[in-house]
Amino acid sequence: MTPLPSTIRALWAVALATLAACSGPLPLGEDAATPPVPDFASAQIAPPPGVNPDGCWVRDIAPAELETVTRQIEVAPTRFRTETVQVIKRERQELIFETPCPDALTPDLISTLQRALDARGLYRGPVTGVMDVRTRQAVRRYQSGRGLPSGLLSIQSARGLGLLATPRDQL
């Protein structure tokens, strides 16, 4: 194999460096397969009718979950064709749920949340007391296992993690 002339190698190096600079790194804990997690301010809504008007409510969109399935289809005796299709495991859905109000999400409570998620193997990172991307993704992992695929902390999850007291009438 003949080596490339130095001018072509230099052009390739410039092109690759330009490409790398354009894409930029993803924030820690994010990848292309992980949908973004909204922050509380952009997701907050007015309380739905018939609920406690003093509570804080949010709206989030859970993306559809797809699964790629590969199967063998018999086209003739002893002859098969491979077919790959995507199957929707869960439709895209709008989620509306109660969440702790912003004044309750103190740095101490968020630090406790991070430690609780770390103890369950869902959070990897420093305990900062800040509701950052890593924390919201860990919240999503915790809540997804309980039927709420959102990175916004719900009241039920906060109570389940021991962060908030459960009122007597709900025991």
Image: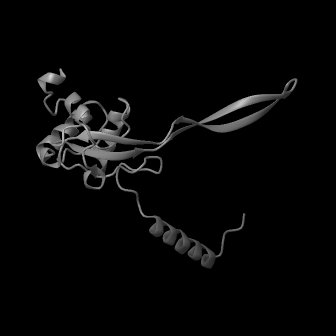
Judge by depth and name the residue closer to the eye, 151 or 137.
Answer: 151
Q: Position of residue 134 (x, y in %)?
A: 30, 47
Q: Quadrant of residue 81?
A: top right
Q: Is residue 9 left or right of residue 30?
A: right
* Circle count: 0
- Colour convention: one colour
Residue lying furthest bottom: 7
Residue most toward the right?
77
Q: Position of residue 156 (x, y in %)?
A: 24, 32
Residue at image position (30%, 55%) is 42
Q: Residue at x 14, y 41 (%)?
A: 109
Viewer-closest of 146 and 93? 93
Q: Give the quadrant of the C terminus.
A: top left
Residue at image x 17%, y 45%?
A: 101
Looking at the image, is 128 positioned above or below residue 143?
below
Q: Looking at the picture, how far across and down is residue 119, in whole percent? A: 24, 31
Residue 92 placement, left or right of 157: right
Q: Nearer the viewer, residue 60 or 157?
A: 60
- In the picture as drawn, the residue positioned furthest to the top comes out as 171
Q: Position of residue 78 (x, y in %)?
A: 86, 24
Instruction: Give the residue at x 31% y 35%.
Output: 122
Give the quarter of the figure containing the N terminus: bottom right
